[in-house]
Amino acid sequence: MQRPVSLLFGVHAHQPIGNFPEVLEDAHFRCYRPFLETLYRYPDFHFAVHFSGWLLDYLFEHYPQDMALLKTMVDRGQVELFGAGDTEPVLAVIPYRDRIGQIEAFSSKLAATLGQRPQGAWLTERVWESTVVPALANCGIRYVIVDDYHFLCTGKSTAQLNGFYTTEEDAYQLDIFPISETLRYKLPFSPANDAIAYLESLSDQHLNNDEAQHDVAIYFDDIEKFGIWPETYQWVYEKGWLEQFIQRVLASPRIKTRHYRDYHAAEKTQGVVYLPTTSYIEMNTWTLPAESAQAFDDLIKESKTAGWYEQKKAYLRGGIWKNFLSRYPESNWMHKRMLVLSARLAGLPENQRTAAMQQKLYAAQANDAYWHGLFGGLYLPHLRRAIYNHLIELEAMLDRCAPRETVTIRDFDLDGLEEIHLQNNMLQIIMKRGRYASIVEFDAYPLSHNFGDTLQRQTEHYYRNVQLDGEVSHKDGDNSESGIISAHDRVLNKHIIHTADLEPDSHPRHLFVDSLNDVLVSYQYTASDSSTIYFQSDGNRQQSIEKTLSLTDNRLCVRYSFIEKSDGVFRTEINLAMPSCDGVGGRFIYQDNILGNFGQLQQLAQLNRITLDDDTLGGCLILSTSVPVRFNAQPHFTVSQSEHGFEKIMQAVTLHLEWPVQRQAFTLTLEVQKHGRSH
């Protein structure tokens, strides 16, 4: 008698911190609830599940009846819970002390809420670095799962991936299961009969076919494929794919569902292995710069056409997850700000550290806003805003315990240029010492908001697939006989996209980027005191300009002094991250009238004062000028990809202020107010 194939079936559920309530509600309706309700009806179908800590908290608060189903399934031995970092961080990019804290916090949460402490852990985006082994092992984690691709990169063959392997780092031991890529693409996209036939065939494969007999099938993938991805709700639930799959697994004498923990306890390791730093192969494309990503993507397509991809894909190595930090300055900036605050928190006396501080730090370590690909939320302003909300709130807490100097200078983002921090407990500006004398970050502590949180447009490798000027190309799923298409293979424009929307920015999207007669002004840092930072133009232009930036209470003042009189035109560009973006909650208010929202073009020939009011922010910015200026405002969009297609996303409202250089001095003021105060 052939030994049944052990099906180790697991799903991973996660939503980014800061996601919109309507998105969470839709995810619950189309995925989490029907998935749990379906599995609940089949107690003999054993499976593993990982809900990220934040999502688990949300579901317990808003949908306790569904969590009661999950608790029942845990109690009756149907479900194995998997651990991770509590806020779904990429463990490899946070400090060791925070890895320990995050893993332990989530394991304790699972034990308290669902009655089971995990032995296995989900690695966010399957990002593997051996440095994470000690923290996992120290927290009682005995095994993790990664892609079979990770193992192939060590020289292992698919035939050898029949069970788990053991690795070690600094004498700490951890076992690793390889997820089957074939199953990741079959479930749930191929018909249930095809998936069952494939599982049953694993026990039929023999060495003379260059395939060893397998007694285990390992699957662990995003639960969002079961209802949230395009077309999957109808396919998985309305057309009954999930129920068919479960029934046919349970009816097959050649398939047996098992828990990872039971398989791990009963079987022996396949031996020692040392995995390279990597993630899944699609991620290794996304993390590369556009030109390199295109070359890598072309190479993969060529290898598939030539028929050697499956045999040699392990030798096709793209980038690593950390490349996102070097590729996107905005990602690196958030990450290094987080590291600085983590160190400050760790440096506090233990009796001053609070659970609230720790939770703010952990929330700022959530992975989603730090990267971009088909998934990842770097391009989504509301996810970056959630990171900054927590960073700024934590910074304010730390300042109350251990006040900083009003001015500090250091290169914290490791780009070779020092940053100048000026803060007064209400506001903070951070500037680079080099070139533009522009503001990279503008924080309002009462609003927990960074007005400088925008994204510079850069070329992405997928731009060559965007349909321009209204042309629409769209790949849909097929019928129930052949399955449905994966999000990786869809091409769809959600919005009309023009060539200009894809042009990279020529300069950073900062606040107060200056130009004289359409030529960018370059400055040098000269000095600073307790309230003011001083810059001087570099002298390569005819006009010599002094630029000073100062903070007084809730006001930022930028003063320009022109040493020589001229007939030129001076312009400054101010990119402001307003939370309502082009939604109805944001508006320009001018002379007590609403001009329109931030997504609309605005032009005023003579402006002294205007208010940018934002319901989502819960406050406003009041811009005032010492003399009238020409005012232009327009939205700043970027084009990104998601599982739903190519889309335009508003990142900031861009203000251009112009005035003739006829005066020796000119002042601009940005005043921050919370709602409830007069505009």
Image: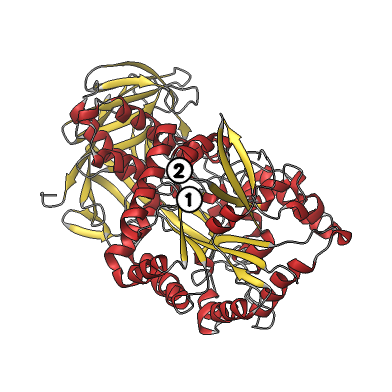
**How many residues crowd around disc 1 within 10 Å: few (fewer than 14), some, or many (20 or more)?**
many
Label 1 residue SS:
loop
Q: Quadrant of the N terminus?
A: bottom right
Mark toward the start of the polypeptide (2 vs 1): 1
Using residue 320 as the reference point, say whether residue 539 is left or right of it: left
Give the residue type that dot 2 points to: Gly
**How many residues crowd around disc 2 within 10 Å: few (fewer than 14), some, or many (20 or more)?**
some
Give coordinates of residue 418: x percent, y percent. 42, 21
Give coordinates of residue 397: x percent, y percent. 22, 35
Does residue 164 sit above or below 211 in this rendering? above
Residue beneath the point at 54% across and 71% down: 230
Give the CA distance from mark 2 to mark 1: 7 Å
How is the model colour-coded? Answer: secondary structure
Give the residue type that dot 1 points to: Gln
Label drawn at residue 357 = none
Does residue 557 sit above or below 45 in this rendering? above
* Nearer to me, 3 or 598: 3
Does residue 485 sit above or below 316 in this rendering? below
Using residue 203 as the reference point, say whether residue 177 is left or right of it: left
The residue sitting at the right extreme is 208
* Nearer to me, 166 or 523: 166
The residue sitting at the top extreme is 527
Question: Disc 1 marks which residue?
Answer: 119
Residue beneath the point at 73% across and 42% down: 154
Give coordinates of residue 66: x percent, y percent. 35, 71
Label 2 residue SS:
loop
Label drawn at residue 140 = 2
Residue 653 visible in the current orientation:
no
Residue beneath the point at 40% across and 33% down: 97
* Nearer to me, 206 or 408: 206
Give coordinates of residue 161: x percent, y percent. 71, 53
Answer yes or no: do the residues labelled 2 and 1 have beta carbons within 8 Å? yes
